[in-house]
Image: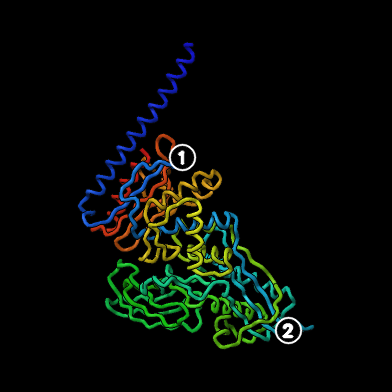
Amino acid sequence: MMLNISRRIVVLLIFLTYTIGNIVAQKSLEQAKEVLTNDEAMSYASIAISVKNVTTGKNILNYNANKSLCPASSVKIITTASAINLLGADYTFKTELLYDGEIDNEGVLNGNIYIKGYGDPSLGASLPQGNKSTEEILQLFVQAIKGQGIKEIKGKIIGDASTFDNAAVPPTWIWEDMGNYYGAGCFGLNINANSYELYLQQTSQLNAKPQVIKTKPYIPNLLFINELSSAAKGSGDQCYIYGVPYQNTRFLRGTIPIGNGEFVVKGSMPDPAFTFASLLLESLEMNDVKTSHLATSVLELTLLNNSQKLKKKKIYTHYSLPLKDIINATHDKSINLYAEAFVKIIAYEKTGIGSLEKGLEKIKEYWQSRGVELGACFLKDGSGLSPKNAISPQIFTDILSILANDNNMFKIYKSTLPISGEKGGLSYMFKNSPAKGKIYAKSGYMERVRSYTGYALASNGDWLSFSIIINNYSCSPSLARKKMEKFMESLIL
């Protein structure tokens, strides 16, 4: 009898300790929220916060949690969570090398070479780690062609991006972004993250014009209208490249610092399928395969009413690294192109139509089927670059809680997220904080917008999903980040 009473007392003490701990933690969160929302820099801001215990499903903090705000790159959480659920963590993108026509006894191909893309955004890119570079990809393709006994190509080298639609960028992206590397469009065939390096010659005089030297890789037919000027030493990269997909004219505006060396900025390719075809043609010539010096794309041929519908034979198929690795890079470096590709490949795999609209439709259908209320979800892209995205924190925490209740999925997905004080976009935060290593989250940032969305490990061992979004703060972006960092520290207490 005494033993049973003792056990009841122990259970009661554990329950009381847990309950009191939760009450103390909730009070700490409330206090942190009050400090943040009453800050002078937040006087004109819209703030929304949701914190949820993923085990119990209980909302711990609800401050405007159902209010739709612009979350910037936190949108990637919805996109990547959808991709890993709908496609699988080990899904791989493919890119095919094909030819039509016949190869004669002399090794002459009386036909064309095709590079058929299936949306791989990482093809030839520097990330994820272990990925093959553009140069390595080109060598693989050249060797595969030579392996067929081909010594000369009488036809064209054709880039085929037709797996995805021709709307390479979402309609709500802004002019200031699209010509720069982070605004690169998403095509059915991508290469080198659809970006190039632009080399500029610095000048020693203020307000003088830096000259364009070259691009790497070389982008055929690209024309720069140079309106740059030189600014003070240490002023940094203030150069913006203006241009849109499929158009070869680029305007250079803004400034770069004075100096006597080369200064490098990054821009977006206008037509990666055509660029890839041109690069392969050049590599073939350098490796003793003669060509007709004709590179083009399926889109260009279609516009010329010369679409290629001949029977094709496969030479080689290249596969990407697993989706989980590409998601890891997407989170760590906030790569917009990768997120947009996830939306389109979901659409292609589920409907056969690789479009943004179909992809967003499938994403919403999926989370609604999992019980997530999406009335406050207004998605305009997959990356968060559109200023017209609006989502509530509650949607983020609901989705993350669903993932957390699948042990295998939680382990994989959590490992792809930046970690406080250690990895990715949170590596420079929480360095000397008790929250170091205990927050796994994606940040979002654009002008007057900051957000953080992810998981936090509370002191009692419970995992919390959280999302905090602030629009229109009146302090500097770095100060807004520090204020939010203080709030997030209270999550782990």
The circle on residue 108 is 2
Q: Position of residue 84 (x, y in %)?
A: 54, 55
Q: Quadrant for the C terminus, please.
A: top left
Q: How is the image coloured?
A: rainbow
Q: Quadrant of residue 211?
A: bottom left
Q: Nearer the viewer, residue 147 or 95?
A: 95
| Vertical comparison of 432 with 262: above or below | above
Residue 388 percent across, percent down from the top left: 36, 66
Dot 2 or dot 1: first in sequence order is 1
Which residue corresponds to mark 1? 55
Task: Report the side of 13 relative to 207 (left or right).
Answer: right
On residue 135, the disc is none
Element on which disc 1 rests: loop
Based on the displayed image, in which of its 4 quarters is residue 383 positioned?
Answer: bottom left
Residue 112 rendering spot, x and y as whole percentages: 66, 82
Q: Nearer the viewer, residue 432 or 102?
A: 102
- Residues 138 and 47: in front is 47
Residue 140 position by quadrant: bottom right
Q: Amino acid at mark 1?
A: Thr
**Residue 264 visible to the viewer:** no
- For disc 1, the neighbor class at 10 Å (few under 14, some 14 to 19, many from 20) is some
Determine the secondary structure under disc 2.
strand
Q: Tally the numbered discs.
A: 2
